[in-house]
Amino acid sequence: MKNKKKTKTKIQGNLSRSIIDILRNNSGKTYNYKQIASILGVNDASSRNQIIKKLAQLAAKKEILEAERGKFKIESNKNYYTGVIDLTTKGYGYVMVDEFDDDIFIANKDLNTAFDGDTVEIYIFNRRRKKKSEGEITKILKRKRTEFVGTLQQKKDFGFVVIDDKSMYTDFFVSGNKLNGAENGDKVVIEYEDWPKKADSPLGKITRVLGTPGEHHTEIHSILAQYGLPHEFPEEVEDFANKIDTSINKEEISKRRDMRDVLTFTIDPKDAKDFDDALSFKKLENGNFEIGIHIADVSHYLQPGTLLDDEAYERATSVYLVDRVVPMLPEILSNNACSLRPNEEKFTFSAVFEIDDNANVKKQWFGRTVTYSDERFAYEEAQQIIETGTGTIPEDISIREDAYSVGGEIVEAVVNLDRLAKKMRSRRMRDGAISFDKVEVKFNLNEENEPVGVFFKTAKDANKLIEEFMLLANRKVAEYIGKQSPKKTFVYRNHDEPDDQKLASLQTIVGRFGHKLNLKDRSSTTASLNKLLEDVQGRKEQNMVDTLAIRTMSKAYYGTESIGHYGLAFDYYTHFTSPIRRYPDVMVHRLLQQYLDGAKSANEEEYEAKCHHSSEMENLATNAERDSIKYMQVKFMQDHEDEEFLGVISGVTEWGIFVEIIENKCEGMIRLRDMNDDHYEFNADEFAVIGKRTGQTYTLGDEVYVKVKNADLVKRHLDFTLIGNRQEVEKK
C-alpha cells in the first residue's frame, strides 16, 4: 500500500471564533484564507472552503474588514467593551457592560485568568438578540483583590492552596521558598503574583498563616481576610489618633450652640460601647416640644487628608461579627472622645426640631452643638418606662448594679417621645413605608466565644422610638439640602422600587400559604406587603416569608443623585446619625456644615466615587457578618448532633431541600441523594420534590423533623438527615 501524504482535516471548534482570534491577536495586519488555514493547521480543500465562506460571512456582518480583495483584518476597537466580571460557582461568568441591557456570558475557557469582581476588557464574538451574547476576556484592567484565603496542600518542596471562595475556579501554586512557614492543612492567606501563559494555575506567595481549619480563631480571621477586612489598625494610625486633642475647650464651645442644660439621654443596646446618638427633650411654653437629635461630632476630630481619615474612608464602615466588632475608627475616638457617654460633655452635630402634639415639625435647626448626657438607658430599661409609665427600673433588666429609679422629668420625656414616635410611624405606614420587623438571631457566648445558646432580638417600642427620631433627622437633613436650588452635591441613601418579576414570584410562593398580594400599583403593593408581614407574625413560615420579602426589594445604596427611598416612602433620605460606624455619615456632616457656612457645591464626581466605594464596603461587611452568623450556627449545631429538630422547608432546589429549624433559625440542607426511601425529583412550578414511586411530596413551608448529619465549620454548612414530615413523625 502506498504511503499517502497525510492531510490535516476538520477544523476543531468554532470557526468564526478562531478566525476572529487570529485577526484580533494581530490587529492591523491583513490575512488571506491560506494564511489563516496555515495558522489553524489545516490544508484539505473542505476546510479551506469553509474558511473562505466564513471570511465572506464575517465581512458581510461587518465583524471583520476586507481591506483589499481576499485580504482581511479587524479594527482594533471593534466589539471591545469594559465591565466587571461576576463569576458563578460553576466556573463561568457574566460581564455587565454599559452599552448593553443584558450581561455577556463568558465561558470558563474564555476567562483568561480573570477572577471574580475584576474589571476587564472583553471581546464580544457572538452577539445575539434573543439569547445571551457571548464574549471572552482579552485583558485584566484591574484586579478587585489580590489576596485570597484557602487551605495549603503541601507536596515535597511546593504546594497548592485550595481557595475557600466558591467562585474561585482554580487553586494557586506556591513554590517551597514562598510557603512562609505554612504546613500541610493550614488555613492561609495567599497573595496573587502572576499567571504565566502556559501555567495551569496562578502563582502566589503565602503572606499569613491563619491556623488550623475549623478552629474558632482561624475561621473568624478567615472571614475577615476573605473580605479583605483589617483585624487591627496600623500603628501609625493608632499613634495619630492618640495625639488628637479631645478636650472640650472653651474656644470650641464658644463656636457652638450650648445645649448642656437641656435634658439629654441615650438609649442603646445593653452591650453597646459606642453611643453615637442622644435625644434631648424640652417642653415649650406654646405647648410644643423641642426635640434634639444629637449625633457624635466625628468630623470635628476626623480631618480630611489625614492618616486617620484615609483609614476610616478605606474601611468605610464598622463590621459587626458575632464575637467582635471591627471598628471604622480607633477606640480612642469610637468608645471615648466621640461616644456620648453619660455625665460627660461632648461635641455634637444636631438636628433640633420644634414638634407639635400631633408629631408635625414646625421648625428645624441644624448645626454644631455641645451637649451633656444626663442618663444612659438600655432598650429594655426604656421599654420598662414606656410600659409602666414610672421611673422604677427593676434589678433583672438594670444595666447598673441594682434596681434604681429615675425622676419624673425623664419619665415624661420618654413617654412623650414614644407617643410622638408612634404617630410618626403610623403616618409613614400610611404613606406606603414597608415594615420589616425581621427577627434577629443572637448568640449567647461563653468566655471562649463558644455559642452556648440562641436568642431572638425583636424590636419593641423603645427600639422603634429611637428608630423613628433617627429617620426624622436623616430625612430632614436630606430634604434641607435636596430641595435647594441651584442643586448642591450631597450624599443620599437611595432605595429603588422592587423588581416586578421578584414581586410576582413572591406572590406565587405566599399564595401557597393562603396569603395574597395586590400588585396593582404602588400603594396597593406596599399595603398588601405590610399586611402579609403582619399576618405571618408568629407563624411557622414567618422567617421564610420575611426573608423572601426582603429579597424582592432592591439593594439600598449611596449616591449623589436622590431617587428617594422606596422602603421608607421618603422622597429624600440620607445617613446622618451614625458617623462613628459609617463613613457616609461623616461625609454628610462635612457637606452639611459647608453649606450651612455658605460654601459652593462640592465636586460631584469625587463624591459619587466615594459613595460607590462606601456601598461596596457595606456589601462586604454585610457578607462577612452573614458568614460569621452562619459559622456560629454550624458551631452551635455541632453540639446537638443526636437531637431531633422540627423545621420548616425554606427552599427547594434540584439537588436538595433547605430546612430552617424553628427553635433556633439555623438552616441546613437535606440532599436528595440522601433521601433513599424513594427517588425524588424536583418540580420547580410546585416548589417541591416528589417521590417517583410513592408520590410523597415535600414542598416549601412544610414542617419536617430533621437530625444533624454533618456540621462543616470550614464550609460553614449544615447537612441534615430527614426523619419525616411532622404529621407522620408525631403519629408514631
Image (cartoon, grey):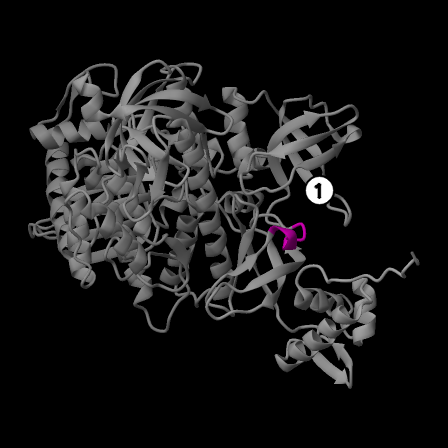
Can see residue 330? yes
Q: Residue at x 63, y 53 (%)?
A: 111
Q: Residue at x 50, y 68 (%)?
A: 100
Residue 463 position, x and y percent, is: 22, 37
Residue situated furthest bottom in the rendering: 69
In this view, 405 is above or below 512:
above
Q: Quadrant of the C terminus?
A: top left
Residue 201 position, x and y percent, is: 71, 41
Q: Is residue 520 magenta?
A: no
In this view, 623 is above or below 14:
above
Query: What residue sits right under mark 1 in the picture?
Result: 202
* Residue 75: quarter of image: bottom right
Report the label total: 1
Q: Residue at x 35, y 13 (%)?
A: 642
Camera-side residue: 364 or 262? 364
Residue 562 position, x and y percent, is: 35, 63
Residue 545 position, x and y percent, is: 24, 42
Q: Quadrant of the N terminus?
A: bottom right
Crowd around label 1: few <14 · some 14–19 · many ≥20 (10 Å): some
Residue situated furthest front in the rendering: 1
Task: Answer left or right for 731 relative to 177.
Answer: left
Q: Which residues are magenta?
A: 108-113
* Residue 372: quarter of image: top left
Q: Residue at x 42, y 37 (%)?
A: 655
Task: Answer left or right for 32 relative to 281.
Answer: right
Look at the numbered disc 1 and give the secondary structure of its residue: loop
Type of amino acid under label 1: Pro
In this view, 269 is above or below 298:
above
